[in-house]
Amino acid sequence: MKIKDMLRAPFIQNQALIQGSRDLNALTNLAVVHQSSGLGLVITIALCLLTPILIPGWFISIGHLFIMGNYLFFMLLSRHLIKVVNQNVNLIRFITATYTFISLILIAYINTVPYPDKPGTLMASMMILSAALFSFSLLEAFAIFSGILISYICMTFTFKADGVIGEDLFMVISGYFLAVVVFLIVNKLRYKEFMLKSHYIRLSSYDDLTGILAKRPCEDACREYLANREGAGCAMVIIDVDNFKNINDSFGHYQGDMVLKNVGEQLEKVFLDTDIIGRIGGDEFLVLLKDIDNLDLVNKKLHHLRQVVKEAVADQLDIRVSLSLGGVLVNPEPVRFELLYQFADKVMYMNKQGLSGFLVKHIADLMPSNKMILFDCDQEAIEIFNGVSEYECLNPSLWRQAVEIIEQGDDNIKALVLDHHKLTVEHHLMIADLKDSHLGVQVPIVLINAKSHIDKSLESVISHSVDYPLTAKKMEQLIAKLELHEGNS
């Protein structure tokens, strides 16, 4: 059994290495192709210049010219591919295997055809070097090195003099087996390095207590999915453990940790492996359900989650626990993570306060339908505005969506309020778009600034200005101006 496991180990390790770090292996191989071809070109040219001096009667064959052309071609090709943004992993694997095979075949040619009376000197060392440099699957490595071995043996019997055939055969066969040994050793070392990196990546990506994604990796995974999804709806859900502080105070922090761990376990059982599940706060969790457009199904899942968590915690810890849940469902159209999170969090708190009869709502039902003013300012400004206005204030995550709504002729948005110190290139571009579409006149663009100056590029489109420090009185004056502007327009 032990011997069987030892024989199987290289195959298992190689498969895990190739599948687990496929993209990284491809990029590493591409970099090695670029470096080795460039270095090979330089060494070959140097040898062609020096060898005739050191070895009388030696001459440059057509094989040397071919191998220099081979190195030059793959150096330029790999240099181009390194600069490509979206790498084709399968293409890189094919190029790596092709480069290795062609380079070794040309070495085999140089060691046999031009010099039939002299023993080959480079074949074994080049096979061993190639085995150490590149990361192949076992099948690829077997095919490449066995193909080279057979080709070299055929060339030897065809072109070499009888006196050197035995020496060449010994050299290439021993080189072949040494290359196999080197490949297996390097493969094992790469596997250990891969497992170590994977361990540390997991430690940095996953929450130690619950075993699900930590806050930053969870949010990054959500952003990546939302940016790349095509033709699929999705739902974001925020989950909060009710009265968690009381649980810690009453039962102790260890038991509180066990409650959180239990919630994490139930989340992984209720939702699919493809869904994104993470712990984003002390007792707060996030789930992004991928490729789903059925509101009833999401609500059923959340009702089921609430029940199984309640039962599991009661059975295992003898603690009564409940969850506050809330989420939003979106259609396939593009949407930002911040927007989804804002509305999912809003629904969760509505449910927590008993203000909503649904655990999950469609995002269209949450978009404000009355007067809206869009802020891209500090939270203090937003809070002051909300305190003195009946308008609904939207946070910066809706900026781009709001501008798109304005450009489509929707009159719900009554003003855009910008912080002078937070203006970005994107803000300038969107303001320019509004100006070019002549909508900036109908929608006031308000600048909150430090009274020093207004950016010259904004002077022609800024309708009103409010100076720091911000006060409720100044915001009331601003609202009066906006309402006057609305009446005039």
Image (spheres, rainbow, N blue to C red):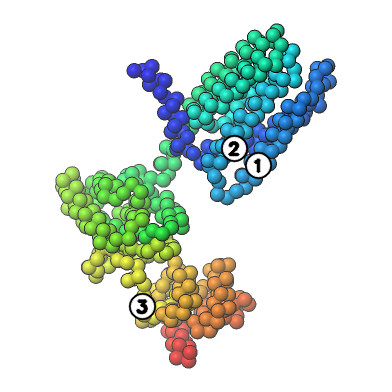
Q: Is residue 249 above or below residue 76?
A: below
Q: Position of residue 105 (x, y in %)?
A: 65, 26
Q: Earlier in the sequence, mark 1 or mark 2?
A: 1
Residue 345 image-quadrant placement: bottom left
Q: Left or right: 41 with respect to 426? A: right
Mark 3 vs 2: CB contact within 8 A: no
**Secondary structure state at the residue bearing disc 2:** helix
The amino acid marked with disc number 1 is: Leu
Of tags 3 and 1, the one toward the viewer is: 1
Q: Position of residue 435 (x, y in %)?
A: 57, 79
Mark 1 vs 2: CB contact within 8 A: yes
Q: Quadrant of the N terminus?
A: top left
**Outermost residue, top direction?**
163
Q: Earlier in the sequence, mark 3 or mark 1?
A: 1
**Outermost residue, bottom direction?**
488
**Residue drawn where x is 62% and y is 47% of the image:** 83
Task: Tell me, for residue 369, which label it has, or none.
Answer: 3
**Residue drawn where x is 45% and y is 37% of the image:** 19
**Secondary structure state at the residue bearing disc 1:** helix
Task: Tell me, for residue 95, which label it has, or none.
Answer: 2
Give the Cα distance between marks 3 and 2. 56 Å
Give the Cα distance between marks 1 and 2. 9 Å
Task: Tell me, for residue 77, which label it has, or none.
Answer: 1
Residue 446 visible to the viewer: yes
**Residue drawn where x is 47% and y is 76% of the image:** 408
Q: Position of residue 64 (x, y in %)?
A: 74, 27
222 vs 285, nearest the viewer: 222
Q: Earlier in the sequence, mark 3 or mark 2?
A: 2
